[in-house]
Amino acid sequence: MLIKDAYKNTDLKYIVANNGIKSDIILNKSGHPISFSFPIKTIGCDIKVEDNSLLYLENDIEVGRIPSPYAIDLNGNKGKVNLSYDKNNVFFTIDEKWLNSAIYPIIIDPTTLQVGAGADDGYVWDNTTFFGTANWLLLGDKSNAFARWTNVTVPQGATISSAKVQYKSNSTDSGTTCATKIYFNDEDNASAPTTVATYNSKSVTTAYVDWTIPAWTADTW
C-alpha cells in the first residue's frame, strides 16, 4: 500500500510479507524531513538498541529485530541512517552529509525480510546429508547452505541493484576466517530443495559474491 505525501515530499510504502509488515520511506525531492518517527507498542517484550539495530527481547531471548537501516538513492549509492529509540518511538535519521550528494528519489530502509521458518532454509553436509529443518545453518567448510525468501516478488527483467542478508552466529570461533561464495538460484518461482539430489540439481547464476566471514562471537550478527 502506498500513502502519497505522508510527510512533506515523502511517501510511505507498506509492504506485507510472511513475517509481518514494514514500510519504506520514499523521499521524492528536497525539502523533506531529515528524521522520521514510528510508534512502538509491545506486550511482554523488552526493547534494546544495539549496533544501530532495534532488538525485541523476551526473557533476554531475541524474538524480533529491526535491522540497521540505510538509504539508497536513484543511482544505487548507499547512505547511513541512524536508528534511535525513546521508549515510545523508533526514529530513523538520515545522514545529511550523504544526502547533499544523493540523487532523488531516495528510499530509506529498503525491504529486509527474514527467511520463512522450516524448509525454506537448510544446508547439505559433505554432499551426502541433507538438513532442511534444523534451527541453524552451517556455512563454509564441507557445508553448502541455501535460503529461499518467500513472498518477494521480483518483476520479469528487473535488475536488483542492492540486497542485504544477515546471519546471527550460534557459537564463538576465534580461529581462521571462512571464505564463502554466494550464488542465486537461476530459476523463476524457485522451490526449496528437499534432498541432496534436488539441491545439486539447482541451476545457479554465473555471477557470485565472495564473502569472507571473520572470526565471530555467539549471538552476534
Image (spheres, rainbow, N blue to C red):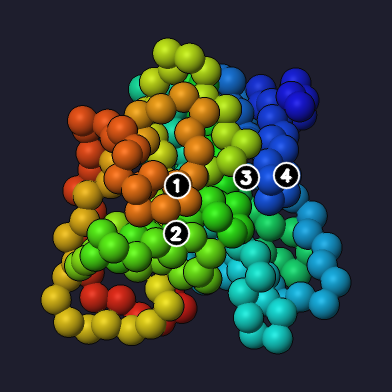
Quarter of the image for residue 54 reads bottom right
CA distance separating discs 2 and 3? 39 Å
Amino acid at pointer 2 = Gly
Real-space Cα separation, disc 3 to disc 1, in angstroms = 43 Å
The residue where tag 1 is placed is: 193
Instruction: Using residue 134 as the reference point, say whether residue 118 is left or right of it.
Output: right
Give x and y (percent) for residue 182. 28, 46
Is residue 130 at all visible to an observer of this figure? yes
Q: Which mark is residue 215?
A: none
Nearest-to-viewer mark from 4 and 2 = 2
Kindly check if marks 3 and 1 are in contact, taking CB atoms under 8 A apart as contact.
Answer: no
Up-down relation of residue 112 to residue 220 (above or below): above
Residue 184 percent coordinates (x, y)? 34, 37
Residue at left 48%, top 60%?
Answer: 132
On the image, numbered disc 4 is attached to which residue? 21
Q: Nearer the viewer, mark 2 or mark 1?
A: 1
Which residue: 66% across, 27% down? 10
Q: Residues within 10 Å of mark 3 (few under 14, many from 20)?
A: few
For the view shown, which residue lies furthest in the top direction?
157
Comparing labels 4 and 1, the label whose residue is closer to the camera: 1
Q: Secondary structure at mark 1?
A: loop
CB contact under 8 Å: marks 2 and 1: yes
The residue where tag 2 is placed is 122
Comparing labels 3 and 1, the label whose residue is closer to the camera = 1
Closest to the observer, 165 or 194? 194
Q: Which residue type carries mark 4? A: Ile
Q: Which quarter of the figure is the N terminus placed in? A: top right
